[in-house]
Image (tube, rainbow, N blue to C red):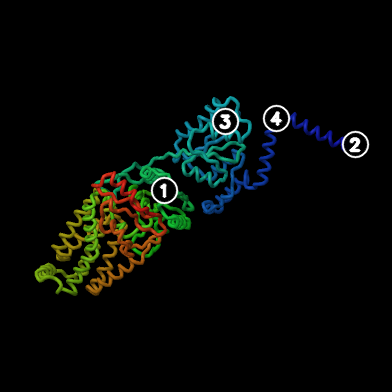
């Protein structure tokens, strides 16, 4: 009994000592918060000063392990100064890292951390610092007593920005700051408020240089992902427009968006695009061309299997056909999958002109591309192996022009083709005014000098110049490169075997194109496999009111894109009655 009374008095004395050391219930709350913080630190050994030691060790021994996920398990410490030291250690001597210390409400210490090269300092001052230091006292006569209540009050009442997120992981906070967000840290809290105040200089909207149009929209994508997404969203005012984002690149953490229309694009196609992107493991993604090489079906071919464009209207047209677009931050070129050879041969302006004019231009384009591939080869085969296939007058003229030329027809054409490609490349790489001058004057001077020096014949200069100019009718630059490359194997076959070599080359080319796939879609569709209903927008372009089906994509949704075909002379009343009487289409 005596021992029990001694223990009771000892417990009362300890309680009285605690009350004297504190100052009422506030001190008890603070003591409870400290106890909870100690318990949290004991459960998570990678907080506090231990985080600082891990970061310093990683930087000193294996800095390359940090982007690979060496810090993924680390979280913030409740100690504000320790967190600031961790960020300053990771950033090194970065001149654009801003650490702004604050005192909010009744003495709670805080800090705002951001890069002033990515986030706007004026917005941080107006939207974060001023509300925390001045407006908060005016909004609340009595500050919140607990730290969770303080965080909630700041998030819901004080900060005026539209996007605020809570983050505890050190890696997620670092990525947010690298994207231009500002991190608000409170002393005693292991959670950072990530405030989206991204603001940096970017290129204005311009017409794409490589895809100009006479009639049609003139806006082009920029290097900013959110700007590009807004250009698409402006043209598709449906809530079923979907954007899925993921980050690719161990060091760059490049944001990539997948765009599609739910209800039109097939689920299997979207899943396949997502799967291929998630499998990419690389140090960094600097342009959408990096993604293109990783996700294409057949890498060992000169033909592009993915369409790239800088035009938002082309992307939206692809989405309306059930395709999927891939937009990469930092790149003005979007990727569209799947695609076909005929899609790459069509220009966006074909749909903005009248159908008859667009059909004429398309047929002319196919004829010129055929001449680009075959005309030099046929000339070499005819003059070397089959002179009997030429008319007598033409054969005499060619023989007279080549009388003093010391080289064979194959050598002439091959050398001039290489010269023309060299001039084209020089014109592209030089400054624009100088490049145009070099391309035009250089071709004229070199061609004229070569003919006068009797190094090449005049017919060869005419053929090479015509095929070179004809190659510019190809709407997409990457397909144009492929066609230009194909000329040289065809030329070698023609110089070695004549017309038999050309026939072999054409057969192998067609077989190769027939074996290509773009995300499961045959490259020559709808010609091979043959689908007559889709020929309305392949080789020719019929009126829009005749194209009431979408292209066939495996796993796609219903293919009807409009109701009953509406001819221009049909009035709305007749169209409504016909639509009601038409059978249901699924």
- Against 30, residue 459 (above or below) is below
Q: Residue tagged by mark 2?
A: 2
Q: Given this view, does label 2 or label 3 mark the residue nearer the observer? A: 2
Q: Crowding near pointer 2: few (<14 within 10 Å), some, many (20+)?
A: few
The part of the image, by quadrant, that contains residue 522 is bottom left
Q: Earlier in the sequence, mark 2 or mark 3?
A: 2
Residue, x 35% and y 51% (percent of image)? 561
Question: Can you identify the residue that label 4 sits on?
Answer: 25
Between the residue at mark 4 and the residue at mark 3, the CA separation in whole angstroms equals: 22 Å
Circles 2 and 1 in contact, beta carbons < 8 Å: no
**The disc label shown at residue 329, or none:** 1
Alpha carbon of mark 1 to alpha carbon of mark 4: how far?
A: 53 Å
Instruction: Please tell me which residue lies in front, 208 or 58.
Output: 208
**Which label belongs to residue 277?**
none
Q: Position of residue 174 (x, y in %)?
A: 52, 45
Furthest-right residue in this view: 1
Q: CA distance from mark 3 to mark 1?
A: 37 Å
Quarter of the figure with residue 515: bottom left
Residue 115 horizontal side relative to residue 403, left or right: right
Report whether 418 appears left or right of 77: left
Q: Position of residue 169 (x, y in %)?
A: 57, 46
Which sits in the foreground, 82 or 227? 227
Residue hosting label 3: 104
* Residue at the spot 16% in from the left edge and 61% down from the top edge: 462
Q: Residue placed at 39% from the left, 63% from the top?
A: 299
Q: Name which of mark 4 and mark 3 comes first in the sequence.
A: 4
Q: Is residue 480 visible?
A: no
């Amino acid at each position: 009994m005596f021992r029990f009374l001694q223990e009771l008095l000892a417990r009362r004395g300890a309680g009285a000592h605690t009350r004297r050391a504190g100052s009422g219930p506030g001190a008890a709350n603070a003591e409870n918060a400290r106890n909870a913080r100690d318990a949290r630190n004991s459960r998570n050994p990678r907080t506090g000063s231990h985080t600082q030691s891990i970061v310093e060790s990683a930087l000193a021994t294996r800095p390359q392990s940090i982007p690979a996920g060496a810090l993924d398990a680390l979280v913030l410490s409740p100690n504000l100064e320790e967190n600031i030291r961790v960020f300053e250690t990771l950033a090194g001597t970065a001149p654009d890292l801003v650490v702004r210390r604050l005192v909010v409400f009744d003495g709670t210490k805080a800090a705002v951390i951001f890069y002033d090269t990515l986030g706007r300092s004026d917005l941080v001052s107006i939207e974060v610092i001023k509300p925390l230091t001045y407006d908060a006292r005016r909004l609340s006569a009595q500050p919140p007593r607990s730290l969770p209540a303080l965080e909630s009050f700041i998030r819901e009442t004080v900060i005026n920005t539209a996007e605020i997120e809570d983050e505890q992981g050190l890696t997620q906070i670092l990525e947010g700051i690298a994207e231009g967000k500002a991190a608000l840290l409170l002393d005693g809290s292991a959670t950072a408020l990530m405030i989206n105040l991204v603001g940096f200089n970017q290129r204005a909207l311009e017409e794409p240089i490589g895809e100009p149009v006479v009639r049609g929209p003139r806006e082009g994508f920029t290097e900013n992902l959110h700007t590009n997404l807004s250009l698409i969203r402006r043209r598709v005012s449906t809530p079923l427009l979907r954007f899925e984002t993921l980050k690719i690149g161990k060091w760059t953490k490049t944001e990539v968006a997948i765009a599609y229309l739910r209800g039109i694009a097939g689920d299997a196609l979207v899943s396949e695009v997502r799967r291929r992107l998630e499998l990419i493991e690389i140090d960094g993604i600097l342009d959408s061309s990096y993604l293109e090489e990783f996700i294409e079906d057949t890498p060992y071919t000169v033909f592009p299997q993915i369409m790239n464009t800088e035009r938002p209207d082309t992307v939206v047209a692809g989405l309306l056909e059930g395709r999927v677009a891939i937009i990469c931050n930092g790149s003005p070129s979007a990727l569209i999958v799947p695609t076909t050879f005929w899609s790459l041969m069509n220009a966006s302006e074909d749909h903005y002109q009248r159908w008859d004019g667009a059909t004429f231009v398309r047929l002319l384009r196919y004829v010129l591309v055929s001449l680009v591939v075959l005309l030099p080869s046929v000339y070499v085969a005819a003059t070397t192996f089959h002179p009997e296939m030429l008319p007598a007058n033409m054969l005499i003229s060619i023989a007279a022009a080549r009388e003093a030329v010391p080289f064979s027809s194959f050598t002439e054409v091959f050398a001039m083709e290489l010269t023309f490609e060299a001039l084209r490349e020089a014109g592209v790489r030089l400054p624009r005014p100088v490049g145009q001058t070099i391309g035009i004057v250089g071709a004229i001077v070199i061609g004229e000098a070569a003919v006068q020096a009797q190094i090449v014949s005049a017919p060869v200069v005419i053929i090479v110049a015509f095929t070179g100019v004809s190659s510019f009718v190809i709407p997409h630059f990457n397909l144009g490169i492929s066609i230009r490359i194909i000329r040289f194997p065809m030329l070698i076959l023609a110089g070695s075997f004549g017309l038999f070599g050309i026939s072999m080359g054409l057969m192998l080319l067609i077989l190769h194109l027939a074996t290509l796939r773009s995300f499961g879609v045959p490259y020559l569709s709808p010609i091979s496999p043959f689908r007559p209903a889709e020929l309305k927008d392949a080789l020719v372009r019929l009126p829009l009111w005749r194209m009431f089906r979408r292209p066939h994509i495996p796993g796609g949704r219903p293919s009807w894109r409009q109701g009953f075909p509406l001819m221009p002379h049909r009035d709305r009343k007749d169209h409504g009655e016909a639509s009601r009487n038409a059978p249901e289409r699924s």
